[in-house]
Image: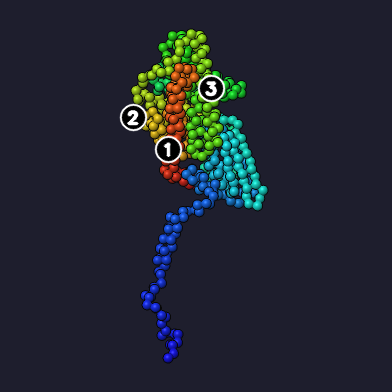
Amino acid sequence: MTEPPEGAGSRPPTDGLPKTQPLRPSQVRQNVNAKRMLRRLVQGENPPTAPMSIVDRLAGSPYANPTIQVGGVDASARKTIDFALHLAESMFRYGAGALEVETSMIAVTAALGLKNIEVDITNQSVSINYAPKDQTPISLLRVVRSWTNNYAGLAQVHQLVTDIVAGGVGRSEAVRRLDDIIRSTKPFPRWMVTMAFGVFAAVFVGVLGGGPGASALAFVSNLLVNLVARQLGRWRTPDFFATLACSFLVTFIALMLRWAGADIPPSIVVAGGILLLLPTGRLVSSVQDAINGFPVTAAGRFLSTFLTFGAIVAGIGVAVVVGELIGSEALDVTQTFPEAYPLWGQAILIAVAVVAIGVTEQTQTRLLLPTAAVGLVGFFALWGASTLGLGDRLSPALAAIIIGLLARVVALKLGAPQLVVAVPAALILLPGLKIFRSMYVLTVEEGDILLGAGGMLNAAAIVMGVAAGIVLGDNLARPFTKSLSSNERRRVRRR
């Protein structure tokens, strides 16, 4: 018996198994998608040992997903790196934090077509290493040796970086615009800044509980302090001795008026007078840099802050000793002060104080009222948290979170970095009177050193909480500000 030939009548053996049907295209796609999803769940988007691209540092910042400009940019890499370093130096001089400087440099170099770069920021130095494959690497370093109050310039630099990232500005135009920003005058003249120093001291003394007489004394003494500080700056006096002289002047004036018979509590006048001398903004930046992963920069700023605190303490101590030699009575730093104004009056004073801080920081005029509004919201949040009994440490931290969140939304809406709005609005949360009392007890009154040290630790905890709250609020606001950044970029592209 022979096997039937292969052909139409032949049938392959089935071995008892059911006949399989070919998969439809939809089923194939479903299987592929299921395998891909399972692979993502198990392995993740990227291999776990792969290095992070430096452009990934832009995630969550206003410069995420930059538009890359191509076409021979690498041939003039040195000019692009020089521009990025000049940009970073300007931002540092105007008061930007390390994270903002780093993200701006990465965004600019990436948008202008440079790959294979590394950015390093150490305290007051900025360096870029450009090492393309099979080419000679370039390493450049820039050191920042001077600082100035110019939040308006910082906001303009932020807008320039936004335009570069959006792809609407080339390198030549960017260099020209940066030079124009550096050469442009500040929004407010010196006499107005001097008056703003006095106004801030006067209204803040009112918030602390001082009456019109104490506010007037704080206004006059801060005018003198600002003039002395400006003259010492012309003489190239180190900041340590300039701060010492200013704190001595504030304390000595208050003691002499009390010695002359004026019914004005010197301690509250001194607290309001030295509040702008306190390096609170620098301390907040130090905490922000430490949280954002810049420990060396944070350590350098912490040391500078510590020296400034030491100068303030030394000035107060010298003024007290001189006053006692003349015959002035000792300060009673334990004295408490009732509220001199109702809540609505304090709110008005807070708004005026925030505007005055904005003037001293040379912020843009269009940002003054929005910053004051953010400060008012923070003040009411502080009042509400204190009324609920959350304590002197947690209440400022919660208010700082709200300020940090609102500051990012308002700042990006108006084309400015978050720092420009957050720092002036949050200065009202810092414990100026507590810091003064603790420093006085710790250095002048030798009877209870532990009380002074405990007060300083408590004040430091409040400042740390405020700084951390601002950073946390900024991070919480990022999901709500992505649309603001994209709208800003679409507006630039339509020009």
Label 1, on which residue? 473
Q: Earlier in the sequence, mark 2 or mark 3?
A: 3
Type of the residue with mark 2: Gly
Q: Looking at the picture, does residue 62 appear above or below residue 432?
A: below
| Residue at 41% over, 63% down | 30
The residue depicted at 54 percent of the width and 44 percent of the height is 107
Residue drawn at the location 59% of the way across and 49% of the way down? 115
Q: Quadrant of residue 35?
A: bottom left
Between the C-alphas of marks 1 and 3, the distance is 32 Å
How many C-alpha atoms fall within 10 Å of the one at disc 3: few (<14), some, or many (≥20)?
many
Q: Earlier in the sequence, mark 1 or mark 3?
A: 3
Report the amino acid beneath label 1: Gly
Q: Where on the picture, by quarter, is residue 186?
A: top right
Mark 1 neighbour class, 10 Å CA radius: few under 14, some 14 to 19, many 20 or more: many
The x, y position of residue 306, in whole percent, is 52, 27
Judged left or right of residue 246, residue 35 is left
Residue 20 or residue 206, whichever sits in front: 20
Sequence order check: which comes first, mark 2 or mark 1? 2
> For mark 2, what is the residue?
389
SS class of the residue under badge 1?
Answer: helix
Q: CA distance from mark 2 to mark 1?
A: 22 Å
Residue 154 in sight here: no
Q: Which residue is mark 3?
A: 311
Q: Residue at x 54, y 46 (%)?
A: 54
Which dot, 2 or 1, sits closer to the camera? Answer: 2
Rendered location of residue 341, percent (x, y): 36, 21
- Mark 2 vs mark 3, CA separation in Å: 35 Å
